[in-house]
Amino acid sequence: MQWNGELAIGLAAALGAGLLIGIERERRKGSGAGRALAGVRTFALAALGGALAEVTGRPELVVLGGVLIVLLAVIAYFRQRSPDPGVTTELALFVTFLLGVRAIAAPAEAAAGAVVVAALLFARQRLHRFSTELLSAAEIRDALLLAGAALVVLPLVPVAPVAWLGGLDPRRLWLLLILLMAVQAAGYVAWRVLGARRGLAVSGLVSGFVSSTATIAALGGRAREAPELARACLCGALCSTVATPIEIGLIALAMLPSALPRLAAPLIAAALVALAAAALAWSRDDRSAPAVPPGRAFRMSQTLLVALLLGGATAVVGIANARFGRAGTGFGVAFAGFADAHAAAASVLALGRAGQLPQTGLAPFVLVGFTANSASRAVVACLAGGWRYGLPIAAGLAGIVAAAWAALALA
């Protein structure tokens, strides 16, 4: 390889990576006989050594250099007198050597990798506290469930469409399940960051992504049992209504992105009115939300139930469309929407994806399900929390539905 500008940039990137990581390690190296393995000079030389081995174009030199770094790290680990049994510095030295090797072909990637490594090393105490004190066992389990569903199960789910699901393939249905879990987990993280004072509002919003109807019913029961929390419960219930149009948009994005332009205006209008209603309730809230200890990032049973509703509603609407045409589709969507707006929307989008409904006519059917579900939520609110709790929610839902239909008519 000739000495040119690109080679100089690669060597500079390797040196910079070694210096950046080495400076962080130098601060923790200590002094005297008990000092740690390596500091700024050792890390810089390791990165440069990896880069020069790569420059020669002889892979055996790169392998030999890596083996040498590992041997030095092993010898230093057994000779050092530090009571800390960790091998972070030794592993960091080997990674730095690999970054030096990579810097010749891709200096930008090597530089980015060095920043990540240095940040991980610098955040040692924060990461340790986050892992052992802030995270609960239930939260770790939920994170593993989400990761397993997305990275292990999803690639194994078949892609072929199923006729009785209205042309919806199982992988897309599983992707919706992952989406539900991820949205709930994101809301739970926000709840942990914001603290318990806003707990009811945030938990209402998060639970709304699973079922706004169930959230309104649960908060209505709490408002009936503890009248002093009625305003906070009302705020949380209205926050759950914000989630419904957002999640319908996410479902459309996952199932049929081409339907979004027609659905965007009514969904945005509904979300804005719902947000305004929640903000109005928040401004009148006495902010007496109770402190709740950390719990679960998402409820797997509820999430699976919603996924089953999506599949079941798709089957109902698909059968109605096949037997009775568009009139049957409208009845099936209204029936599905009375139980769950997300399921009704998913069933309509599945029909559009399968070509059984024109994409230009999907939005009215989606809003039929949305309207039916809003009516059911208003009834549930009055039954669960009484008139003082139910009437404001019914008024907010009426405004949300009116805004969605008006936006569709004007679009």
Image (cartoon, rainbow, N blue to C red):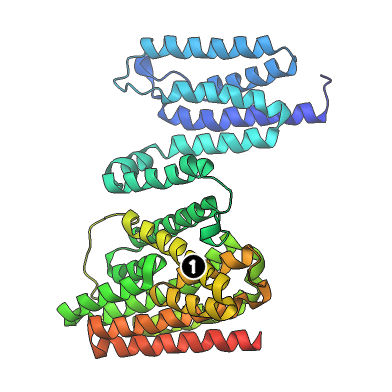
Who is closer to the viewer here, 174 or 295? 174
Residue 146 percent across, percent down from the top left? 41, 47
Q: Mark 1 is on which residue type?
A: Glu
Residue 371 percent across, percent down from the top left? 46, 83
Where is mark 1, residue-wise? 247
Kind of element beneath mark 1: helix
Q: Quadrant of the N terminus?
A: top right
Who is closer to the viewer here, 140 or 77? 140
Q: In the figure, 98 relative to 259: above or below?
A: above
Snapshot quadrant of residue 386: bottom left
Residue 66 percent across, percent down from the top left? 57, 14
Crowd tier of the residue under label 1, counting other residues whose Cα lies within 10 Å: few below 14, some 14–19, many 20 or above: many
Task: Name the residue rendered at 17%, 82% in the picture.
Answer: 227
Who is closer to the viewer here, 302 or 41? 302
Q: Quadrant of the C terminus?
A: bottom right
Which residue ends up furthest to the front in the rendered image?
323
